[in-house]
């Protein structure tokens, strides 16, 4: 078996609440994700899904446990190394697209590549390719305000994949869309992940979408529990 794109082992995380003490959000959460694998993360609001995704994406640190991306242990990496790993190895998608309103769809996909040292010509080619894969080749020169909600979210997917990350982390990526649009957007997401061979951990409340992924993990009392097959 190939090296996992993401491996979390024994992740613990708590938050101090003043005099009452501490609330433990994660209690030894562990998961490995292989290239091309799409894993659903299901849990009630407030259970710690976002915390787990932020730790996996090096936006937050665990109290204990290890975080490996592409086989490299980045648990205690310094800020510069964590920033470089986030930029080069991790793609993020959120419920709200957070596109830059003054730039076109293509420019929103080009900019993160320029920040990563890619030439303008290469970045433009990559942006055009990604937008075409999600059916937006004719909308590339439109600003976000001129796009529908589903189109905006597809642009956000392309932006997350612009730097060819190893792992995609998504937090309720279709939660702000109507059911029909959510299906279209999710189809585009699955296609991009499968074609590029990255791994994906996708938090969702939508059990129908979760059922279309390779496997489902439930976050229960701070631990990841696999849903039984079948």
Image: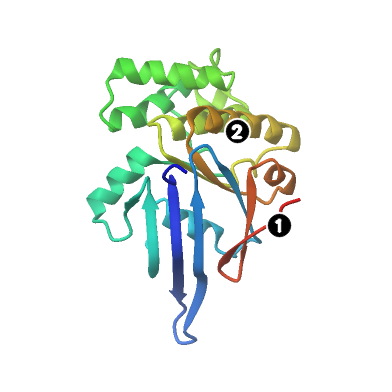
Residue placed under numbered mark 1 in the picture: 228
Vertical side of 201 occupied by 180: above or below:
above
Task: Say left or right for 207 vs 142.
Answer: right
Q: Does residue 6 show up?
A: yes
Q: Position of residue 176 (x, y in %)?
A: 64, 42
What residue is rendered at 45% in x and 67% in y? 10
What residue is rendered at 37% in x and 40% in y? 89
Q: How far apart are marks 2 and 1 (CA)?
A: 22 Å
| Label 1, residues with CA under 10 Å away: few <14, some 14-19, many ≥20 | few
Label 2: element kind: helix
Q: Position of residue 86 (x, y in %)?
A: 35, 45
Which image quadrant for residue 106? top left
**Label of residue 81 in the image:** none
What residue is rendered at 49% in x and 33% in y? 197
Q: Which of marks 2 and 1 is in front?
A: 1
Q: Position of residue 34 (x, y in %)?
A: 49, 44
What residue is rendered at 55% in x and 63% in y? 48
Residue placed under numbered mark 2 in the picture: 190
Task: Say left or right for 85 vs 178.
Answer: left
Q: Earlier in the sequence, mark 2 or mark 1?
A: 2
Q: Does residue 58 show up?
A: no
Q: Where is residue 156 in the image (x, y as percent from the top left)?
A: 51, 33
Vertical side of 8 occupied by 150: above or below:
above
């Amino acid at each position: 078996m190939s090296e996992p794109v993401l491996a979390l082992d024994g992740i613990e995380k708590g938050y101090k609440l003043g005099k009452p003490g501490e609330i433990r959000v994660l209690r030894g959460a562990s998961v490995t994700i292989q290239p091309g694998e799409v894993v659903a993360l299901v849990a009630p609001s407030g259970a710690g899904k976002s915390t787990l995704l932020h730790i996996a994406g090096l936006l937050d640190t665990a109290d204990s446990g290890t975080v490996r991306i592409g086989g490299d242990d980045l648990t205690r990496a310094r800020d510069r190394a964590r920033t470089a790993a986030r930029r080069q190895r991790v793609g993020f998608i959120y419920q709200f697209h957070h596109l830059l309103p003054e730039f076109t769809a293509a420019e929103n996909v080009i900019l993160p590549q320029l920040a990563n040292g890619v030439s303008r010509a290469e970045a433009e080619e990559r942006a055009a390719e990604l937008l075409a894969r999600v059916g937006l080749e004719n909308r590339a020169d439109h600003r976000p305000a001129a796009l529908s909600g589903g189109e905006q979210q597809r642009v956000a997917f392309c932006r997350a994949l612009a730097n060819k990350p190893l792992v995609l982390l998504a937090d309720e990526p279709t939660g702000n869309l109507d059911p029909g649009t959510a299906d279209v957007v999710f189809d585009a997401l699955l296609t991009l992940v499968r074609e590029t061979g990255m791994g994906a951990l996708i938090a969702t409340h939508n059990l129908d979408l979760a059922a279309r992924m390779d496997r489902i993990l439930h976050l229960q009392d701070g631990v990841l529990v696999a849903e039984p097959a079948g």
